[in-house]
Amino acid sequence: MSDNTAAEKPIIAFDNVSKVYTLYRNSREQFSALFYQSKKLKKHLALDGVSFQIMKGESVAIVGRNGAGKSTLLKMITGVAFPTGGDIYVNGRVSALLELTAGFSADMTGRENIRFKCYVLGLKDAEIKEIEKRAIEFADLGEYIDQPVRTYSSGMRVRLGFAININTNPDILVIDEALSVGDSAFKKKCKDRINELIARNVTVLYVSHSKDIQDFCQRCIYLQKGKVIFDGSMQEAIRKYPELVN
């Protein structure tokens, strides 16, 4: 394969992807479903024949009303959920700013949680040491970095979560309303860091209902009831669907 062909290969591709969730009325019904399938169980089609390609270095807004399928799509990109039908291709290290404080050990210190997260990602010791340094500087938690996370306020946990994910040298950065938290100074710091990654040709997927999407994204994918109803430039999306940034 030539270098040009390799360069044109998408970093993310969805090919006719669907996702069906089974809706259980209670835990007993869910347990019973492990042994036999009932035709009475309700189904929810979260994604319905979704297809698109994203190239390396693109910054793409994923938008739509609540229940449109945005979170399901992001979970599939990050490997948390899997399709019922269709094919998904993801080529590169993904860093996801979804639930920023998920996966923290409350009894471990902030510093220990940084190392733990890096080990889970399969990073080497030399790389972990550098990421730890950058994450501690970015989070700016002072002496609390060596205190158990259970002593942190919710804001401090968010700062630590963002600092870890933004500094793990991702090929793909997934952001789900993460900038809706924190004080204005920290938000600006986060935005500046995201812009640095975009300048370094990192692929960015950004879910938001704020005007921030215009600052980061050149392309927009609009989901409605599990289907892609628009895939084009950010400027055209705003003209066609002004409610996106309201």
Image: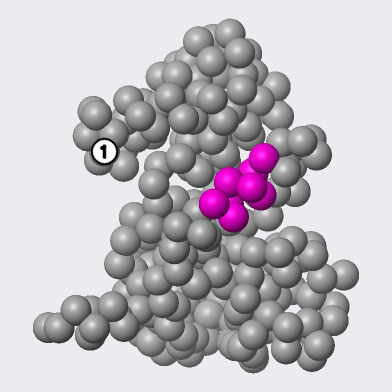
Q: Is residue 193 in the magenta section?
A: yes
Residue at 71 percent across and 64 percent down: it is 215
Q: Which residues are magenta?
A: 189-196
Q: Quadrant of the C terminus?
A: bottom right
The answer to whether one can see residue 28 in this image is no
Q: Look at the magenta stretch and give its main secondary structure.
A: helix
Q: Is residue 201 left or right of residue 6?
A: right
Tell me the residue that label 1 is attached to.
Answer: 123
Note whether 193 is above or below 5 in the view shown.
above
Residue 225, how many percent across, how many down? Answer: 65, 83
Which residue occupies the foreground of this view, 185 or 26? Answer: 185
Residue 156, how many percent across, how many down? Answer: 66, 25
Residue 104, how many percent across, how many down? Answer: 49, 29
Residue at 41 percent across and 89 percent down: it is 16
Say few, some or many: other residues with alpha carbon within 10 Å of mark 1 (under 14 / 14 to 19 / 20 or more): some
Note whether 185 is above or below 7 in the view shown.
above
- Residue 219: image quadrant is bottom right
Residue 111, how many percent across, how many down? Answer: 45, 19
